[in-house]
Amino acid sequence: MTEVLRRYGPVLTGVILLAVALWLALLVVLPQVMMVDFSFRPSLPPSRLGGPEDVYTVRNYATLWTNQIHLAIFLKTIWASALVTATTLAVCYPVAFYLAQVASKRRLPLLILMLVVPFWINELLRTFAWYIILAFNGPLNVLLVALGIFDEPQRLLGGDAGVIVGMVYVYILFMVFPLYNAIESLDRNQIEAARDLGAGWIRIHWRVVLPHAKPGIAVGCIMTFMLAAGSYAVPALLGGPQSRWFTEVIYNWFFEGGNWNQGAAYAFILLVLCIGFILAALRLFRVGLADIAK
Amino acid sequence: MTADRLRRLLTGFYLAVFFGYLFLPLIVMGAATFNSSRFPTVTPWMGFTLSWFSALWADQRMWAALGTSLIVGAGVIALAVPLGLAAALLLDRLHSRARTVLYALMVSPLLTPGVIVGISTLVFWREWFGVTGGVFLTVVAQSSYIAAYAMLLFSARLQRFDPALEEAALDLGATHGQVFRRITLPYLTPAILSAALLAFLQSFENYNTTLFVRGLDTTLTVYIASKVRTGLTPAVNALSLVLIALTVLGAVAYEILRRREARRTAGSEA
């Protein structure tokens, strides 16, 4: 702290501290605390706030257990997000490995640019692109019928499958960059050495590349899972009433059910799920938070 | 040798499929703009038209939503960039446990689902200040995590900063204000520009957070989503195509600038 003061002087230090305090207090910490506090209170009309009924309760959390539909949607959100995460990891690993270790120096900038550009494009527009593809009279149905896989066009929108396919597409770039960064720092000689010592390709990946890429895998999985579980745009566009996502249930509590306390409880459950996934991923890949911060 | 060739062939095939997968959906969506079908599709092809661009041009609500998005974007730049800058300046001079804690707090909004950022902002501002959803709350909610992106950008640039420059100026009698204005700020100017650009793009495309805090105001991204669900015509494709073209131009320009800058730094250090 003394070094801050010495470097920036009293006035500037004051401004810096004030700005950081405002950001962290008003924009980050207090809203979260307030949301949690709110979730443990009953939903009451203004006249009865502060009255005898205004006490802390876990009723809003019990709702998730008693409402079978919401519980099913919650569990579906978990496994579908895990599936999205696993699929993106499987699809991205070969690409990331190729870019980081195999691609020639001349070709690499263009390939990276081809990854960066879609990454900048609005998530909603990338989702919308799949709306066009999956439409009943869309190109995918035409293709599948032409290939003889379907006898007639199928409904591809409005189900869980369409939502999952769309999510893999929309969030894939959040997996490929952390993987690429992690594999890129692996010394090519280590792979050469393993090969000279007689290791096959599978063994090289399993024993050399994958262990080195663990922090990248952890970051990619954490980002993808968080984005998938917290996605509203993709299920809203590609899903339907039969394939509701947990975020849509939360939205309905706020803007259709008019029960903010209940919505806050569901939102906190979603947050706990994401934090739980982060901790599990760190444990599974045996990396610390500090490795991720890099 | 043949096994090697086979592997190279398979790798090439896989890459082609992967990049095809990345770009083909966007190309199909763009192509549907020029099909004179009432529903945006490329199958069947009903003939080439440009009429959906004029339909888009005449859409008053689209222009209003664009206006809202620009106002929100400007607000986010004005709020998130200074916050991120202050945070990076502070972190740069801390080395203790406090730094780790602060850093974790600062990046935590990036690991929080966007809907939760929106919900917590909405609840907090209504309960404490009686402020309901609208442009103001949208700026506040978006800034809470976009400031973290700005902080990361500034921190990366500050890591390559030589503190001896500031030391020397202070030793020569410059005031703290002068050092900041004449040395630190000019050094950070490229980062300020990239942070502003990033903040604007993040704000412009945000959907999940905005949805909860927008009140009755509609940003362009929210407008597109509502059009897809009710009243979809290829005019939405025309809008998407325009936005994607602008984004691609911006991204390519940004990358080229970034690489030139990186080469220049590498050159001056060598």
Image: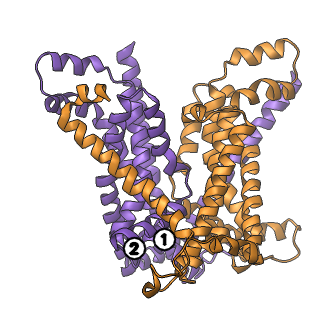
Where's the N terminus of chain A, which quadrant?
Answer: top left
Q: Residues within 10 Å of mark 1 (few under 14, many from 20)?
A: many
At horizontal 59% and vertical 38% (from top left) the residue drawn is A111
Q: Are marks 2 and 1 in contact (CB under 8 Å)?
A: yes
Can you identify the residue that label 2 sits on? B133
Amino acid on which the number 1 mark rests in the picture:
Phe
Amino acid on which the number 2 mark rests in the picture:
Gly
Q: Is residue B42 visible?
A: no
Residue B19 image position (x, y, % from top left)? 66, 47
Q: CA distance from mark 2 to mark 1?
A: 8 Å
Query: Chain A appears what colour?
Result: orange
Judging from the image, mark 2 belongs to the subunit labelled: B
Residue B247 image position (x, y, % from top left)? 45, 54
- Which badge, 2 or 1, comes first in the chain's sequence? 2
Residue A34 or B196: which is nearer the viewer? A34
Residue A218 to residue A202: above or below: below
- From the rendered image, report the letter of the chain displayed in purple: B
At horizontal 82% and vertical 16% (from top left) the residue drawn is A195
At horizontal 34% and vertical 76% (from top left) the residue drawn is B64
Q: Which mark is residue B212?
A: 1
Residue A46 to residue A112: above or below: below
At horizontal 54% and vertical 74% (from top left) the residue drawn is A55
Q: Are marks 2 and 1 on the same chain?
A: yes
Judging from the image, mark 1 belongs to the subunit labelled: B
Left or right: residue A170 compared with residue A137: left
Residue B169 or A269: which is nearer the viewer? A269
Left or right: residue B243 compared with residue B168: right
Residue A8 image position (x, y, % from top left)? 23, 30
Q: Residues within 10 Å of mark 2 (few under 14, many from 20)?
A: many
